[in-house]
Image (cartoon, helix red, strand yellow):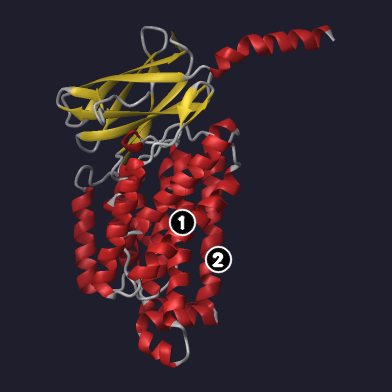
Amino acid sequence: MGVLTNIGLISFVALSAYLLILAGEMSFGQQGFFGVGAYTAGVATAMYGVPLPIAALMAMGAGAAAAFLVGLPTLRLRGLYFAMATLAAAEMLRIVFELIHFQREIDGEPVGPDGTQGFRGIRWVFENGVEREGYLAMVWGLLFVVVILFLIVERSKLGATLRMLGEDPELARMLGIHVERFKLGVVATAGALAALGGALYAHHNTYIEPRNFDIMLGVHSLAYALIGGLGTVFGPLLGVLIDIGALEGSRVFHGYRMIVFGGLVAVLLIFRPRGLLDERVVHWLKRRLA
Amino acid sequence: MAKAALGLILFFTAFPLLAQKVQGELACRLTKTDFVYDCMIRISRGGQPLPGASVTLGADMPSMPMAHNVKPVKATPGKAPGEYAAKLDLEMPGEWAVKLRLRGPVNDQLILLYEFDEQGAQPVRRGGRLPRK
């Protein structure tokens, strides 16, 4: 059950990286917004008694705002430069988390972010009697809603615009699309999505610390989209299933998993640069199913 | 009326106990198998041992949350009250956030940060101080 919850939680940040890839941008910094969501929701529930659903919405707002502020200067950059800028922004956010010491005394105990010591006591789930099965259902229910929204968008004009933007931004500009404004919206939405995952992670774990949001999470979230495929929203989910579900869950490569995972990414980037479920496979599957 | 008064008295007598924080600590030693540790967990509430809890032990690497974690195992009651034993099968040495899921007298989750190596497990020190339990 823990593995299933982890698959659900990490899928949010994988989908946020996927959304940016669709718009033609690779971000190594989605873990920063995941962290913003985790801290925002944790502070809201543990320190101020805000119910989790409202805290999750607050986290999404904070994640979107942080991503918007990062996107404002960095979207002028292209390709590798944008990727490096997002990584730098995420590292800056992580250092900010290390510097935050903001606590309140609750029941005689200090509660709140305490720099590198982390943030303990995010106990909304326990205080409200939510069982593990219930929380798993909550995570997967929200993920289901997100996937449905992705499917609706992918079939709409908005989805076509998004893919066109990723393929050829100059053509999109000539067709009258305000590329910068559109991309800024995508960046903010991706930030909100990562932040939602962070809010759910903080309440699942009850403890967060700045190191939870370092580059490893960002690299993995990007890798999931690249392994699973960029042809459909199910691609990043397949990537998460392969890594967390098959490699981590089965423990077949005990201790050597990261080597296998790295090798898998390298092989796929050579032979299937747009992942297992790329546009061609998705088109073929659609024709077969129609 | 009398029952309600008795209920209120019982509630307020029990309240300080309910509000008391549950704490845990860990003592582990490496077994003959690589990365497998025999661990003894001590759970207390308000400084007193907490027996009769159902304890499940898991672990997560803080630098790679969700992707590097060990399968939770159920701890068995130890010899002394408040003591529980479990075998922890880690993927590698290093810093792990050990997750204790408690059921029974309390429904809670404790996170204990420990550094695992050949010697066993030591609490992680950050900024020259030990993290709160």
Q: Residue at x 33, y 69 (%)?
A: A74
- Helix, strand, or loop for circle 1? helix
Query: Which residue sits furthest right?
Result: B1
Q: Mark number for residue A148?
A: 2
Q: Distance between the residues labelled 2 and 1?
A: 21 Å
Quick check: do tags 2 and 1 share a chain? yes
Residue A172: name its quadrant.
bottom left
Q: Residue at x 34, y 37 (%)?
A: A115
Q: Is residue A13 visible?
A: yes
Residue A270, relative to residue A111: is it above or below?
A: below
- Mark identifier at residue A142: none
Q: In this view, does A247 lie to the left or right of A114?
A: left
> The N terminus of chain A is located in which quarter?
top left
* Residue bearing mark 1: A63
Is disc 2 surrounded by few (<14), some (14 to 19) or many (20+) residues within 10 Å? Answer: few
Q: Is residue A96 left or right of residue A188?
A: left
Farthest-out residue, bottom: A174
Label 2 or label 1, whichever comes before in sequence order: 1
Residue A94: image location, x then y, percent: 32, 48
Q: Where is residue B74 in the image (x, y as percent from the top left)?
A: 40, 26
Q: In the displayed structure, would residue A232 be above or below residue A4?
A: below
Q: Can residue B67 be seen in this view?
A: no
Q: Nearer the viewer, residue B37 or B120?
A: B120
